[in-house]
Amino acid sequence: MRPFGIYIHIPFCRSFCPYCDFYKVRPDGELMQKYTEAVVNTTASFSHIYGRRPVDTIYFGGGTPSAVPGSLIADMPEAVRENFDVASDAEITVECNPSSDLESFLPAVSAAGVNRVSLGLQSASDGERRALGRASDAVRVRQAVSIARAAGIENISLDVMLGVPGQDRESLLETLEFCTGLKVPHISAYMLKIEEGTVFFDRGESLDLPSEDDVCDMYELTCDKLEAAGLKQYEISNFAVPGFESRHNLKYWRDEEYLGIGPAAHSFADGRRFFFPPDINAFIEGAGTADDGPGGSFEEKVMLGLRLTEGVSGLPADFVRRVAERSDLAPFVSADKTTLKLNRRGFLISNRVISEILEMI
Ligand code: SF4
């Protein structure tokens, strides 16, 4: 039986970023206490359904986990250990906002077993960070990395954003040099997407966004600079020193099973996908999950696996051959017997290339 990953959603944010469409609410002492109890209770109910399954990753995402007192977060891995068979070398990640009180938060969660931190840098340019609604400056991000290391956490990831308002090649270069100078072993570099229902969406044309060509150029620059610094690309947007790839996120892309706890958290277990509705009060009151259909289909494995540089292997040879013979796909795909991979040009237009491939199934 393959180990589960467990995702715990912490839906609290002190301020709301203008590009964000995640489910979140403002932090409130009593609400955070009740929420922690609900996470602990849900962990126990999941173990009644799935048994004492092995678990090898736990991921606290948000929202902003570091907006919650470290003592409350610390109760959650404990609850997972009480109800599941957690590996002694489990990867336990917590997402942090550098502007949080990390001086008290990180030692508390480290003592509870957290051994990986993902910090939201987005940009080393304070102007770009302000445009994204981020309060802290680059100096604070540097301090946050030091605080994590002082708390015994060396496995640190920085989030970088491409296509930010006002960003250009030079400012991105400064951001990448800032990251590589900190010698963190993992960097995620996501392209800004303008989602409906966000402040950025409403601002429309008035946003000073780089052109599509410039963003493609920035993506290539990012891949080149990070690879040159020893951070090997392993997914469209993720780069790591070998051995420091996110074991939790790899489960999503390899179509493996995981349990998601919290409002708007999704799960994939025993062949079904399901999720908790995005409503913190309903979650606290014990509302159940909603079914999201079957998971683990061939199409799904291809769609997710093509995000990885390792690609998808074990495919029928005639399917791989048919893809390889398509002259319009050839510049974006590499095919070898039963394995398909996208190359960097393919990653740049991955949605289009993957949907063309899926139509051939
Ligand atoms: S901190 Fe993260 S989750 Fe919260 S509003 Fe900003 S982007 Fe969204």
Image (cartoon, rainbow, N blue to C red):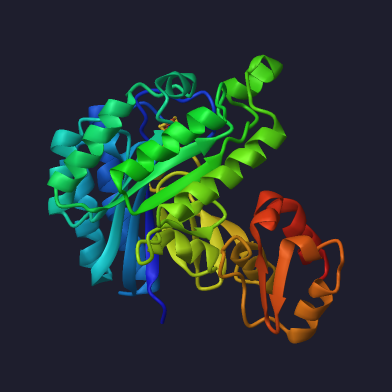
In the depicted structure, whether residue 63 falls above or below residue 8: above
Q: Is residue 106 at least partly visible in the picture?
A: yes
- The quarter of the image holding the N terminus is bottom left
Query: Which x, y percent locates residue 64?
Result: 35, 36
For the residue pair 78 and 201, the one nearer the viewer reads as 201
Q: Is residue 227 left or right of residue 359?
A: left
In the depicted structure, whether residue 359 falls above or below residue 208: below
In the depicted structure, whether residue 285 falls above or below residue 132: below
Determine the quadrant in which ligand 1 lies.
Answer: top left
Query: Which x, y percent locates residue 289?
Result: 49, 54
Query: Which x, y percent locates residue 234?
Result: 50, 61
Query: Which x, y percent locates residue 351?
Result: 71, 52
Where residue 124 sits, quadrant-wise, is top left
For this orientation, the residue located farthest to the top is 206
Q: Which residue is drawn at 55% across and 26% down?
A: 167
Q: Is residue 182 left or right of residue 71?
A: right
Q: Which residue is drawn at 56% across and 72% down?
A: 271
Image mark count? 0
Q: Is residue 281 left or right of residue 142?
A: right
Q: Is residue 63 at least partly visible in the picture?
A: no
For the residue pair 112 and 238, the one nearer the viewer reads as 238
Q: Which residue is drawn at 66% across and 14% down?
A: 206
Where residue 137 sits, quadrant-wise, is top left
- The quarter of the image holding the C terminus is bottom right
Q: Is residue 19 left or right of residue 226?
A: right
